Amino acid sequence: MKIKLGLMLIALLLCGCDNRQPPPKGFAGLGEQAGAFTPVVPGRVFSFPADHGVHEGFRIEWWYVTANLKDAEGRDYGVQWTLFRSALNAAPQASGWRNQTIWLGHAAVTSSAVHHAAERYARGAVGQAGVQTTPFDAWIDDWRFATQASGADPLADMQLKASGPHFSYELRLTSTRPLVLQGDKGFSQKSEQGQASYYYSQPFFQASGHVEIDGQRYTVSGPAWLDREWSSQPLTANQTGWDWFSLHLDSGEHVMLYRMRHKEGAPYLTGTWIDAQGQAQTLHAGQISLEPLDTAVVAGRSMPVRWTIRIPGKRLDITTDALNPNAWMNLRIPYWEGPVHLSGSHSGNGYLEMTGY
């Protein structure tokens, strides 16, 4: 999914800019009505490379990459890179400092011993941050997710880089595989009431490069995953947070799952099974069992860092374990996000994000 923390920026920025705003509704105010923003409806026809770029008229969107990496000694690392665009109003965006777009970047690295995260904020239309499609380039300050390809697919060969006070990374991401439309041909529903986003992924990236942690540099490689989403009202007032998984199975298949938790009632649960050729099948709640097994106290919160996932129709029965249970994103918008290992009927690795705890 990647309903993602950038969505919380809407409520936080609006409250910060205007003290007359009413109290938030639902999780981080994301149950607020979309107002004049463009609604997400079924039947959109995706167009690339245009849909890699900015979607004016929508309230929130993001470009999100995770990578599960190993060094030459077999030690595991995780990398996260996210760029969010948040529009403060639905009107056409003005130039220069009159622009009503806010950009936010999150980056992190994780090992079994440490987790480091950093963030960047920027205004739109003044060169601090943005996204262009030809050639594709998404940036905030000197953090970048940019094409190195000259062919028809701008995502075939990418550079990814970011840095913080205690870490940096620079990776090359390549893929010749197709993009995957999540949900119903890219219409990804988030509630029984119809809240949704437009959502596609590239789960077939292979990454190589280096990460630096506390002054030590490691040459690394492994699978990576891109998520792209945009929306205007993705949650309901009753939804309190989510648990989201992106999983690389060693069999060559991939799985995306998310559970939207509610103040009252059962969670909204769905996902996608992606076969080794890139064909996607939507998974509904009755086809999935997603349950927390063990918790850890992280930043004073009880977090479910070990889960069981069962998809009987695919003969999947696995346990996910966090590489580092203390993968807390201690930023202005805090949450848990880190790499996980898989064991059971299938081996592999992936990423887990948890919010609202």
Image (cartoon, helix red, strand yellow):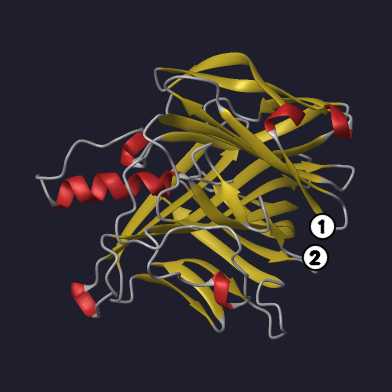
Q: Which quadrant of the rendered structure holds the C terminus?
A: top left
Residue at the (29%, 75%) spot, across then down: 92
Secondary structure of residue under mark 2? loop
Residue at the (58%, 39%) spot, across then down: 110
Q: Position of residue 112 (x, y in %)?
A: 63, 31
Disc 1 target residue: 278
What is the count of numbered marks?
2
Disc 2 target residue: 177
User: Against 196, is 176 above or below?
Assistant: below
Query: Which residue of the protein is positioned furthest toward the left in this rendering?
Result: 20
Q: Amino acid at mark 1?
A: Gly
Which is in the foreground here, disc 1 or disc 2? 1
Q: Position of residue 348 (x, y in %)?
A: 80, 37
Q: Position of residue 32 (x, y in %)?
A: 31, 44
Dot 2, crowdedness within 10 Å: few (<14), some or many (≥20)?
Answer: some
Q: Is residue 329 visible?
A: no
Task: Kindly check if marks 1 and 2 are in contact, taking CB atoms under 8 A apart as contact.
Answer: yes
